[in-house]
Image: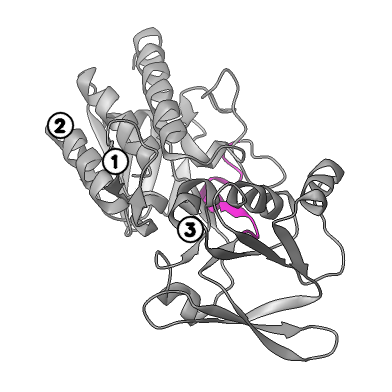
Amino acid sequence: MYDVIIIGSGPAGLTAAIYTCRARLQTLVIGGATWGGQLMLTSEVENFPGFPDGILGPELMSKMRMQAERFGAKILFEEATSVDFSSRPFKVNVGDKSFEAKAVVIATGASAKWLGLPSEARLRGRGVSACATCDAPFFRDKRTVVVGGGDTALDEALALTKYAREVTIVHRRDQLRASKILQERVFAHKKINFVWNSVVEDVLGKDRVEGVKLKNVQTGEESTLSTDAVFVAIGHKPNTDVFRGQIELDEKGYVIVHEETKTSVEGVFAAGDVRDPRYKQAVTAAGSGCRAALDAEKYLQEHPI
């Protein structure tokens, strides 16, 4: 029986663990087989406060992990396979092991949707990215490609225009799906151009991105476009499959919260990208992890078992 089980080990989960452990709450972090969240796939992080020279994503997460462990967090590097939030104590299952907690913090994050190309995976962090807000400054005066046609893609393209000399949006259709106001902004921007009715067949380059191979979905014609970076902006998927039927989710699968961190089940809280389809930043995830931990602490004071 733990006071708190935190499911997830990205910035939200580990920040929550730091706070619950400092509150002397016995804490188990079910961190996943690949712990650390999306920052483990990021090269240099320049926008996390406290690191004026930047820090590598995996190094930042290692420091957060050490800090949580220093205060007494127990971290299990396995996946939660099922949960039972129907009554307290709550149950979280990891394979054939079962753990109980008086309160739970969900911090499983969201995963960027990728194109599924081997070259894309190989060059991730070497010019392939899913976050312009994070990585755009590395491509100052460079050529960039954004893949997608929704709000996410257009937001990424506009963010890139502050740094890149050229932004090309590659979209599989002949019209965008984004909101009209975003469309007006990108069509009016001199740095942004389009390749319509096309998909990325391959990302070119050995040690860094040098171009993309495109295919026109209507004619089948293939072409090559030189670029220094590829930003995949086809959306994110919240990691909430294990919670379906246990808590309230929105139509996209994100956890619905009330009063910042409270889910539809009293005593179960949510933090980070798993409940935030808008900001998707390490610092906002860490902030919500702090809030979830403080809310869990208050809840346990008022509802002891």
Q: Is residue 234 magenta?
A: yes
Q: Which residue is mark 3?
A: 139
- In this picture, residue 171 sits left or right of residue 75: right
- Image quarter hosting the C terminus: top left
Whether residue 117 is in magenta: the answer is no
Q: Nearer the viewer, residue 237 or 176?
A: 176
Magenta region: 233-247
Q: Check the image and report above or below for 153 versus 281.
A: below
Under circle 3, the secondary element is helix
In the picture as drawn, the residue positioned furthest to the left comes out as: 70
Q: Secondary structure at mark 1?
A: strand
Give amino acid for label 3.
Phe
Query: Which picture quadrant has residue 49?
Result: top left
At x 20% / y 41%, what residue is drawn? 63
Label 1 or label 3, whichever lies nearer to me, is 3
The number of callouts visible is 3
SS at badge 2: loop
Image coords of residue 76 (percent x, y): 24, 49
In the image: residue 2, left or right of residue 11 = left
Residue 19 image point, x, y percent: 28, 23
| Dot 2 amino acid type | Gly
- Residue position marked by numbered label 2 in the rendering: 72
Question: For the N terminus, which image quadrant?
Answer: top left
Lower sequence index among marks 1 and 3: 1
Q: Main secondary structure of the magenta part?
A: loop
Which of the pair 84/140 is nearer the observer? Answer: 140
> Measuring 62% from the left and 51% from the top, which residue is drawn there?
161
